[in-house]
Amino acid sequence: MPSSYHSLTYHIVFGTKFRRSFLAPDVRTDIYAYIAGILKNKQEKLFAIGGVEDHVHHLTTCSPTVGLSDFIRDIKAYSSKWLHEERRLRDFHWQIGYGAF
């Protein structure tokens, strides 16, 4: 085959450390927009995003040239830094693990 085609779409879920309820409705709105921006900068497509006070779900593409764990690590690191700096949530942390389906 002279060219490659891929279509890798993941349902990714990750939560707050100790499932603490950091993500109030106004924070969720902002963090969803921020995560959407991260994905746009990575040239990925975001199909849906949502969640509750202690975890986030999103349905997105991920390039096969990027390791999925690195992709999720970047999303969590950048969004956590943003929450610390912009929302002043100094005690905020994402959990170590994640689900990707």
Image (spheres, rainbow, N blue to C red):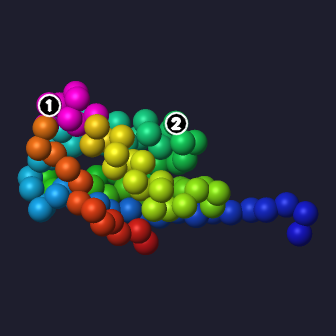
Residue 25 at x, y percent in the picture: 14, 42
Residue type marked 1: Arg
When the figure is inspected, residue 98 is found, relative to residue 73, above or below; the finding is below
Question: How much space separates mark 1 and mark 2, taking CA atoms?
Answer: 24 Å
When the figure is inspected, residue 70 is found, relative to residue 44, above or below; the finding is below
Magenta-highlighted residues: 82-89
Q: Check disc 1 and report its element: helix, strand or loop.
A: loop
Residue 51 appears in the rendering: no
Instruction: Tell me the residue at 22%/36% (across/down).
Output: 83
Q: Check disc 2 and report its element: helix, strand or loop.
A: helix
Left or right, 73 with reference to 64: left
Asked whether 85 falls inside the magenta stretch, the response is yes
Residue wearing tag 1: 88
Left or right, 2 with reference to 77: right
Front residue of this view, candidates 74 and 100:
74
Q: Residue furthest bottom?
A: 101
Asked whether 71 falls inside the magenta stretch, the response is no
Instruction: Tell me the residue at 44%/39% (across/down).
Output: 38
Query: Within 10 angstroms of label 2, few (less than 14), some, or many (20 or more) residues?
Result: few
Residue 88 at x, y percent in the picture: 14, 31
Residue 89 placement: quadrant: top left
Instruction: Tell me the residue at 90%/63% (across/down).
Output: 2
Residue 99 appears in the rendering: yes
When the figure is inspected, residue 72 is found, relative to residue 88, above or below; the finding is below
Residue type marked 2: Asn
Residue 84 placement: quadrant: top left
Instruction: Tell me the residue at 23%/60% (across/down).
Output: 95
Residue wearing tag 2: 41
